[in-house]
Image (cartoon, coloured by chain):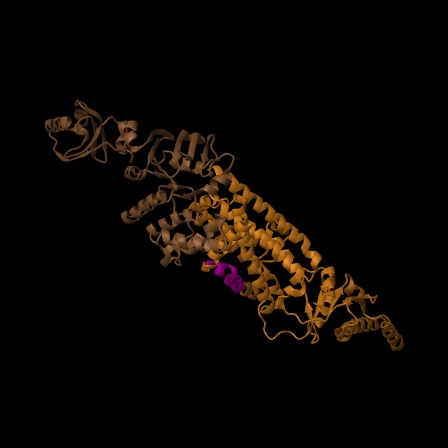
Amino acid sequence: MEALLAIEVLNLHKSFGENLAVQGVSFEVGQGEIFSLLGPNGAGKTTTISMLSCLLRPDQGDARIMGHSIRSDGTGVKSALGVVPQDIALYEDLTARENLSFWGKMYGLRGAALKKRVDEVLDVIGLRERANERVGKYSGGMKRRVNIGVALLHKPKVIYMDEPTVGIDPQSRRNILDSVVALKEQGMTVLYTTHYMEEAQELSNQVGIMDHGKMIACGTHEELVKLVGGQTRIDLTLSVDPLKVLEAWQGIEGVEHASVEDGQICLLVADSNLVLPRLFEAATRQSARITSVDIREPNLEAVFLHLTGRALRD
Amino acid sequence: MIRILDIAFKDLLQLLRDFKTFMFLLIMPILFTFLFGYAFGGFGGGGDSRLPVGYLSQDNHWVTDSLHELLSESELISLNENVFLSQADLEQRVADGDLAAVIIVPDGYGRAMLKNKSARLIVIADSDSSAWTSIEAELLKISSRLDSAVRTATIIERLDAERMPFDYAFEQSLAAWKDPPIAVTETKSPAVEKTSDSGAALAHTAPGMMLQFAIAGLLTAAQIIVTERKSRTLQRLLTTSTRRIDVALGHFLAIFLLIFTQFLILITFGQLALKVDYLREPAAIALVAFSAALCISSLGLLIGIIAQSEEQAISFSLIPMFVFSGLGGAWVPLEFTGETFRAIGHVSPVAWGMDGFENIVARGLGFDSVLLPAAALMGYALLFFSIAVWRLYAAEEK
């Protein structure tokens, strides 16, 4: 039996003047799955989310959220989903309880049901004790938790989280990632956008990689890694300007890609055992000393590098 | 509908937590009302126990100046010389009981008196009122004094020139008193209350400052709308079933309630503490306050939607405050300016608001006099609101 789809995106297009923000994006997410949209800033992730939230009307294509079309049934779409925006979209001069109460009303909750649900969400985000403090006085991590709590108020079937870990401390980040997993365990479908490869790798059943408005790859982690054909990534730091040895290393047999990123040389190689001695020899010939070597197994960052020729953080 | 109320309630909660709201909406207008009131009319203290009598001179003659001097020295009547009021305005004020009577000096009064022709003052009064008997006696006394002085001087001058016999001169003097020197026009009026110069000044400055600081107060409301958009909270609102028009109406309702409440508080303060007689025509004042609040709230919504930052929201609130208030006569009455400036001034909605309030508290007119100002203010409200909503929807695809 075919699994029920929570999100079905069909050939979405959106442009702003000359800027083709999203070009023919399609993907599917089954119910209860976490799907990560991975890509650098400006890849078109937020525009895609905005179309799926009925905030932007697509120029072409359609999407169905729990069976509701974003083109013809905006109300159905909005009732099925909760959105966690990238920014802290809260009223800072209201308390956490007042914020949750206001947003609950916007989602159609009233009276005792609203009060009960606000208390439940405060428990989920761990802020019951400080619920009557103004949000403006909270730390960045606490604000993020309230930001997520708002999207949970009406118990949506699908939740969009747009880069929810940007600019927060590691502990808060950990809490948020744990809460995403918890949502999945409760049966929610999560569409998660990020430009952190590790988050997508850790959380997702499926990952869609976007670049310049296009979906350049989509699949499970294993399926995507296969795209790089078992390549290993090696990052090397040198005692001299990396550009001095870059050309020499590009010519070494077994090196399939070489680039300089953040003062390091980044290589994709077929067999690291075979290539590493040759790299040392070439460096010595250039009177350069290798000061650090970092060998990484194939991952999503390598996939992105393989597909675009650029690092994900570029 | 319920979402509109929820948004309005949330906005009011935010506004009431901001000290600037109280600063601009209540404290500043009261302070500036006193300041401008003092500058225009002063606060004499002690009050004037004389009966207020309007005075309108259509004659430019030294005899008329002498009449004015005698009237000014009266211990019974106090002349109210508002040059901005027409004969009809003054008559209305007598009818409303704001003035005990009105003395009108017709054109040619002084010349006629010198030529020994019939020269009569026109007096508008309610002859049934208790004040009238006293005023009539005082007017007869003063006008007779002036008349006798002029006639005596004329007769003496002629006697001296023509060597006229005394008997003839006496007959001439006696005959001159056949016609009384005043003519009375009947007007029914309620009881007359005392008035003062400071009251007239406050009748202008109190509404002026109220309107000016209602616009200044928009900066806090506009900032809330700007912050909502900048923090993407507006975007989030639109991911719920809330429509853009609900958001606009919710914000508008909050600003309207705030400004209308401000008006009610300041009108009550003006009535009780400053003795500005707003409640002479409560329905008319309510209509002007309502339409002015609609207009200023729509302007606030527009400012909030077009401003890109909190700083812009402040500028966009303060600039119209200065321009509209200055142009609209909130600081200096438009009556002090020329006709052209007065016409230009009415481009500002504040001018219409001032007209509405002043027609009641300064000019003593009735309910009908506020219909045009109220209609103009509602027209502005519709214009500002339409532009605001259009801008809100136009921003959708950005």
In percent of width and height, residue A208 lies at: 35, 32
Q: Is residue A51 above or below residue B62?
A: above
Label the magenta part by its dominant secondary structure: helix
Please name whichever residue, B43 or B163, is drawn nearer the observer in this view of the structure.
B43
Residue B273 in sight in this render: yes
Magenta stretch, residue numbers: B20-32
Q: Position of residue A105 (x, y in %)?
A: 49, 51
In the rendered view, does B334 fall on the left or right side of A215? right
Task: Please count the marks in the image.
Answer: 0
Q: Is residue A215 above or below residue B71?
A: above
Residue A9 sits in quarter: top left
Q: Answer whether residue B28 is magenta in the image.
A: yes
Q: Tell me where residue B21 appears, x and y as whole percent.
A: 48, 58
Colour applied to chain B? orange
Image point (51%, 37%), residue name: A73
Q: Quadrant of the C terminus of chain A?
A: top left
In the foreground, A90 or A35: A35
Horizontal side, residue B173 vs residue A231: left or right: right
Q: Tell whether position B223 is magenta.
A: no
* Left or right relative to A300: residue B363: right
Residue occupying image coordinates x 61% and y 56%: B290
Using the rendered view, name the quadrant where residue B387 is placed: top right
Visible in this render: residue B308? Answer: no
Q: Colour of chain A?
A: brown
Quarter of the picture containing the N terminus of chain A is top left
**Measured from the top left, where is residue B342 in percent x and y?**
63, 52
In this view, which residue lies farthest toward the front? Answer: A1
Above or below, B216 relative to B41: above
